Amino acid sequence: MIWNEVVSEQIYPTIVHALVERAKLLPQAVALTAADEELSYARLQAEVEAAALRLVRLGVARQERVIVVGDNTWQWVVAYLAILRVGAISVPMNNRLAPAQVGDLGTLLDARIALADDAHSHMFGDCLGLQVFSINGTVAAPFSSVDKASALPGMPDPADDAVISFTSGTTGTPKGAVISHDGLRKASQVYVDLIGANEQSSTLIVAPLFHNTGFVDQLGTMLLCGGRADLLLRYRTQDAIAACRRRPTTFVTAVPSVLRMMMTAEGADAVYGPAKDVLFGGSPMPAPWSLEMHNRWPGLRLWHGYGLTEFTSCCTILPAELILTYGDSIGYPAQGVELRLVGEDGKDVADHTVGEIWVAGDTRMREYWRRPDVTAEKLSGRWLRTGDLAERREKGLLYHVGRRDDVINRGGEKILPSFIEAVMAEVPSIAQAAVFAVPHEVLQNSVMAAAEPRPNLTVDVTEVREFLRHRLPGYAVPEDIIVSTDLPRTASGKLDRRAIRAGYLESHKEPK
């Protein structure tokens, strides 16, 4: 099979249609598990329908925004799918947002209703006019007590808006990418076809469900193929291993650091032994890690995916057979994706030349919700300007080299932080690194770095800088390296370069 070929025999119009049909075809098959609970497809469909009826009774209209927030529970899944079922727009909300951010988001959405678990219903305390219903308890108004309505509306239209997914950055005004039902389904279909998922497939969702990784790459994929999605309440390595011992999984997906934590833990065979496919994203996997996985579990297929919220999920895939030889690459455009590398002049660049990644396809967002100014900056006709920089090298493979707005100009020398970070990642004592610019009175900018040490290891800054001098041009070696186990992160778990820089600048302000 060609790795990016459409191979599915059954294509459903939407994820909701898939659930309804799977409940008819496989009523007793397990659709969802959470700890010791199992929900068959028939029960999941019944729970979704009951919740959808309650939403109708609450007066939720087609294309109205409804927020859902909580930990990874089956009740979250039911609430999310029920919103889609009635034709409303589901807004999976980051459960780690600060009160001010929740207020900004609520104002932007103009939402009337939020569905929350008991642990997170307090987040909406400052949102006037918002009714909060508890999906699993009684802290807020109990959702289950709402009388059922007499009838559900028709099934959602593939062309309707389905989800508003907020970008994972932690600074600035929230930006919600509006995704259609058609785009949502096609984004999950990419993974069904990539790994050949079927009724025997299963996945353990360790990422928060509010991430596209959770509700698109894993939950949506399993619903389309009739497989099983296992929910981990929140990520802890030993809990993930215990869950895999209880119910072996065939499809594992996470960022490289999480995959590594499970690889090095006692019981790693429970995770990777039964698995057929491992997908990672967010950054390349260090070559020694990929090689170790290949040697320990030779039947395992490793895939590297590059994507972004504004494209629903996946833009490119590095095929499994190229991981060991071209592991730094982000691969080729995924199924249904058109991709260009565009220069400053708006024209496509030649091979071995850095350009901005532009992508087009059915999974592209429609807009940023009620942000026409930012939407206009991001979209050019049918193309999405990603802001990511890449170049095309041998075999036509794409290599991500940084962000347009992250390039450091040091005395006229253009420096990509990601290049320095990749070299720093080779230092055995460093788990993750973030490189950023700080003002310099002569050079305009100088290079700084922050490093997170690996557990039980110490980062020697002098030794690291000496290592970098042998691997980097002199102007690219960081002036200093901050070492901390408590560096800020984005919602997706990456080191937050902007927040680290802001903290550094704040702590180095000259006294007035």
Image (cartoon, grey):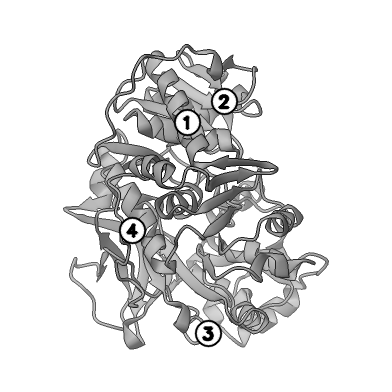
Q: Residue at image x 62%, y 74%?
A: 424
Contact check, label 3 and label 4, Cβ < 8 Å: no
Q: Which of marks 2 and 3 is in front?
A: 2
Q: Is residue 322 above or below residue 408?
A: below
The percent coordinates of residue 224 (x first, y second) are 40, 52
Mark 1 is surrounded, within 10 Å at the Cα level, by few (under 14), some (14 to 19) or many (20 or more) other residues, namely some
Q: Which of marks 1 and 3 is in front?
A: 1
The percent coordinates of residue 21 (x first, y second) are 36, 43
Which image quarter holds the N terminus?
bottom left
The percent coordinates of residue 158 (x first, y second) are 25, 42
Mark 2 is surrounded, within 10 Å at the Cα level, by few (under 14), some (14 to 19) or many (20 or more) other residues, namely many
| Residue behind mark 3 | 324
Please, what secondary structure does the residue beneath circle 3 have? loop
Q: What residue type is labelled 2?
A: Ile
Q: Residue 386 carries which label?
A: 4
Of residues 467 and 510, the one nearer the viewer is 467
Q: What residue type is labelled 3?
A: Leu
| Residue behind mark 1 | 46
Please, what secondary structure does the residue beneath circle 1 have? helix
Contact check, label 1 and label 2, Cβ < 8 Å: no
Q: Which of marks 1 and 4 is in front?
A: 1
Please, what secondary structure does the residue beneath circle 2 have? loop
Q: Which amino acid does label 1 sit on?
A: Ala
Contact check, label 2 and label 4, Cβ < 8 Å: no
Q: Residue at image x 39%, y 14%?
A: 149
Dot 1 or dot 2, earlier in sequence: 1
| Residue behind mark 2 | 135
Mark 3 is surrounded, within 10 Å at the Cα level, by few (under 14), some (14 to 19) or many (20 or more) other residues, namely some
Q: In which quarter of the image is residue 188?
A: bottom left
Q: Which of marks 2 and 4 is in front?
A: 2
Dot 1 or dot 4, earlier in sequence: 1
Cα separation, mark 1 vs mark 2, equals 15 Å
